[in-house]
Amino acid sequence: PEAGSDATATQATARLEGDHYVLNGTKVFATNGEAAEIYTTFFSTNPKRGARGISAFIVEKGTPGFTFGKKEKKMGIRASPTYTLMFDNCKVPQENLLGREGGGLLVAQSTFDVSRPGVAAQALGIAQGAMEESLAYARVRRQFGQPVSSFQAIQHKFAEMGTRIEAARALLYTVARRIDADKDRRWTKESAMCKLFCSDTAMWVTVEAVQACGGIGYMRDFPVEKFMRDAKITQIYEGTNEIQRNEIAYHMIKEAASKKS
C-alpha cells in the first residue's frame, strides 16, 4: 500500500531460504485479482539497496500463504475485478524469480514499454464508442424543431472529438508499428506519449459526449456515462499521466544532451 507511482517504496519482502523464496506483504489494486491464475508480483529482496533491491516473481493462484483481501468497489471498469493480494510466509520455488535478483524494476519498466500502448488502445476504443453513441443520439434528439446535431455548438464538439480521436489513432498505430519492427529497442518515451495522449483524449471526449447528450447523457441507462467512468482509469493505471510526462521529458532531455555531446 505504501508504493504506487513510487514503486521503490514497497514494503513487501522476499527472503531466500534454501531453494525457495518466502514472500510477505500486501499488494493493493491488483487488476483481475482472484480471477487470474498467475500473478506477476514485485518484492524487495534487499531493502538496503532500494530500487536495485526489488525483484519480480511469478506466483500461482492457490499457493499456500497467498490469499485475497477485499474486492474494490470502483467508479469504472467494473467487469475487471480489483482485489488486494495478501502474502503471509508464501513459499515459491527459486525458479519463480523473473530475471535476476534485484532486476525487478527493469522487468516492470520494459513491460510498460509494450503494455502502455495497450492502455492507449483501450482509451481510444472508449473515446470512439462515446463519440459514436453521442453522435447517433444527437441526430435523433430534437430541440427547437430540429435535430440537436444541426446546432453549430454541437457540431463543433463532434469536429473536435473526431479530430482528437484520429490524431490519437495515428500516434498509437505509429508507435505500435515501430515496436513491432524493432522489439529489441526500448520504447519508453514513445509508449508513454501514446498512453498519455490517448487517455487524455478519451477523458476529454467522454466528458464532451455526456455534455452533447444533455440530461440523458448523465443517466445510468444510457451508455455514455459509463464511457466517462471507464475513461478515467486510463489516465491512472500503467503509470499516471503525470508519471508519463516525467518519462517523456526525461528522455527528451537525455536525447538532446546526447546530440550536443
Image (tube, grey):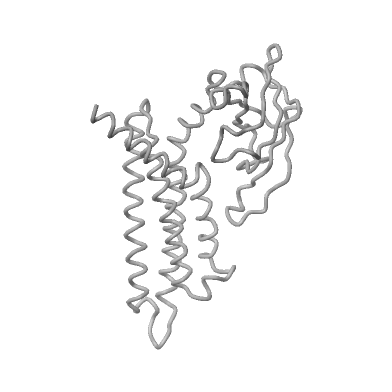
Residue 94: x percent and y percent? 64, 16
Classify residue 117 by image quadrant.
top left
Q: Is residue 129 left or right of residue 100?
A: left
Residue reaching furthest to the bottom: 145
Residue 243: x percent and y percent? 46, 43
Figure label count: 0
Q: Is residue 231 above or below residue 40?
A: below
Classify residue 23 by image quadrant.
top right
Residue 56: x percent and y percent? 58, 26
Residue 84: x percent and y percent? 69, 41
98 or 140, which is in the foreground?
Answer: 98
49 or 218, which is in the foreground?
Answer: 49
Residue reaching furthest to the top: 18
Q: Is residue 53 left or right of residue 261?
A: right
- Tell me the residue at 53%/56% (across/down): 230
* Position of the N terminus by quadrant: top right
Q: Is residue 45 left or right of residue 190?
A: right
- Tell me the residue at 43%/57% (across/down): 127
Q: Is residue 96 above or below residue 236?
A: above
Q: Is residue 100 left or right of residue 36?
A: left
- Tell me the residue at 44%/68% (across/down): 134
113 or 129, which is in the foreground?
Answer: 113
Q: Is residue 144 above or below residue 31?
A: below
